Image: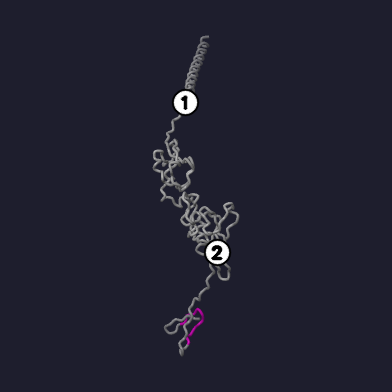
Amino acid sequence: MMSRLQRLDRRTLIVLVGAVILALFASLLYAALSRPAPPPPVAEKRTVVVAGIDIPAHTTITTSMLAAVDKPVAGLEPDAVNASQASAIIGTTSLIAIPKGSDVTMHLVGHPSQVSLAVSLVPGERAIAIPIDRIKGINGLIQPGDRVDVIAIVPPRANEAPEARTILRAVKVLAIGRGLDATNSASPGPDTAEAPTATLDVTPAQADELALADNNSQLRLTLRSPKESARSEPVEPVSFALPAPTAAPTTAPAPAAAPGSPAPHRGPPGVQIIEGDKIVNGS
């Protein structure tokens, strides 16, 4: 009887200890879950300058174009312009177009001397100039921003007629003379009727082809409608190979013998003959 009571007391004790442990664990868990979450850290902010309007490329920056906005420091460019520094960029020029609401950074603005054609080119584009005149430039009606086809007129060779082939289609005109694309410039371009060059936007392979064509043919430009697809017609291959020159004789003719002197002895072709102290080729 005592052994049974002892076993019962032992089990009761174990149950009680277990209950106490569970209660303690439950109380700790409840305390952890009911504890309010710490507030999120406050992001550090800076008052920076943004574009208040869409600012075109190559435009002089004025106060009315800018706005001040508080933004988290974590998302800012290293050279973002602080509101306190806004006066430093007034009067500078936008190197590229800056959309409304975009951060104004120091690498997006510069002085007019820094504005160049290279700024408007993207990787993979090349600018190449070809000579034009009033006729080739369609009497000055081609303007920067237009799309043109380039025709190469190859001069006649031997009995062949001259050829005219369109080697490039729908290439963009970047500049006429020194006037850049009017759509990206705050100032109007110059009179293009007498401009000596047209600068075109091409790929590296097209630049090679155009340089070869300029050196071996006459180039003409034709103006395209902006509504026409660039792939409406294919380009036309053209060859600038020259006819093979006529082979010149490999040996000089033998000099005529002096009057009254015996004719020199000649042997078979390819055979050298010795005459006294001279070596004579056979003929």
Tell me what residue is drawn at x 49 percent, y 77 percent. Answer: 251
| Residue 194 among magenta residues | no
* Tags 2 and 1 touching, CB below 8 Å: no
Query: For numbered disc 2, what is the local secondary structure?
Result: strand
Q: Secondary structure at mark 1?
A: loop
> Where is 199 relative to 253, above or below?
above
170 is higher (above) or lower (below) than 56: below
Position in image of residue 198 (x %, y %): 49, 57
Q: Nearer the viewer, residue 196 or 164?
A: 196
Q: Foreground residue, 46 or 75?
A: 46
Q: Which residues are magenta?
A: 263-273
Q: Nearer the viewer, residue 17 or 199?
A: 199
Tell me if residue 266 is in the magenta stretch.
yes
- Looking at this rendering, what residue extends furthest in the right direction? 232
Q: Which residue is mark 2?
A: 153
Q: Residues within 10 Å of mark 2 (few under 14, many from 20)?
A: some
Q: Which mark is residue 26?
A: none
Q: Nearer the viewer, mark 2 or mark 1?
A: 2
Question: What secondary structure predominates along the stretch shown in magenta?
Answer: loop
- For residue 237, what is the image quadrant? bottom right
Amino acid at circle 2:
Ile
Q: Which mark is residue 37?
A: 1
What percent of the width, then of the height, locates residue 23?
Answer: 49, 18
Real-space CA distance between mark 2 and mark 1, rounded to the nearest whole angstrom: 79 Å
Residue 275 spot, x, y in % from top left:
44, 84
Image x and y of residue 134, in percent = 51, 61
At 58% from the left and 54% from the top, the residue drawn is 225
Look at label 1 and name its amino acid: Ala
